[in-house]
Image (spheres, rainbow, N blue to C red):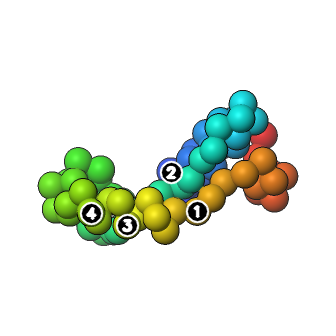
Amino acid sequence: NGSGQKGAKKVASLLCAYGANCKIVTLKPTLGDKTDVNAYFMKYERKDFIECVKNAQEFTLNDIEKHNIK
């Protein structure tokens, strides 16, 4: 959902500011609009999560300015 994505971007920007490399992982929707992480791991296998990580959005310090994150 929108608030979860906004929160993920804020945390990623903070981590990037301290030198961490970040990716934002989007899980396959399983339960309508919101994805419950516990339910996700009951329905999908480890290989599915690894595929999500491979396709994850890279997040850099430039994204802080691009998304106007404070």
Q: Is residue 43 above or below residue 6?
A: below
For the residue carrying disc 4, how many other residues have a C-alpha within 10 Å: few (<14), some (14-19), or many (20+)?
few
The residue singled out by tag 2 in the image is 4
| Label disc, if present, on residue 46 of the rendered structure | none
| Image location of residue 21, percent across then percent down | 63, 44
Q: Position of residue 42 (x, y in %)?
A: 15, 55
Residue bearing mark 1: 57
Is tag 1's residue or tag 3's residue first in the polypeptide sequence?
3
Whichever of callouts 4 and 2 sits on the residue coming sooner in the sequence is: 2
The residue that disc 4 covers is 47
Write down the residue under mark 3: 51
- The Cα atoms of the two marked residues, 1 and 2, are separated by 15 Å
Q: Is residue 59 above or below residue 54?
A: above
Query: Which residue is found at the position 49% from the left and 68% from the top?
Result: 55
Disc 4 secondary structure class: helix
The amino acid type found where label 2 is placed reads Gly
| Residue 26 appears in view | no
Residue at mark 4 to residue at mark 2: CA–CA distance: 24 Å
Residue 23 is at least partly visible in this image: yes
Label whose residue precedes the other's in the sequence (2 or 3):
2
Residue 44 screen position, x and y as percent? 20, 63
Report the Cα–Cα distance between label 2 and label 3.
Answer: 21 Å
Circles 3, 4 touching at the beta carbon (< 8 Å): yes
Which residue does the image show at 50% across and 51% down from the upper left?
4
Q: In this view, does 52 lie to the left or right of 11?
A: left
Q: How far apart are marks 4 and 1 (CA)?
A: 18 Å
Q: Where is residue 20 in the image (x, y as percent from the top left)?
A: 65, 37
Say which quarter of the image contains residue 63: bottom right
- Is the Cβ of the residue at disc 2 closer than 8 Å to that at disc 3? no
* Spatial CA span between label 3 and label 4: 6 Å
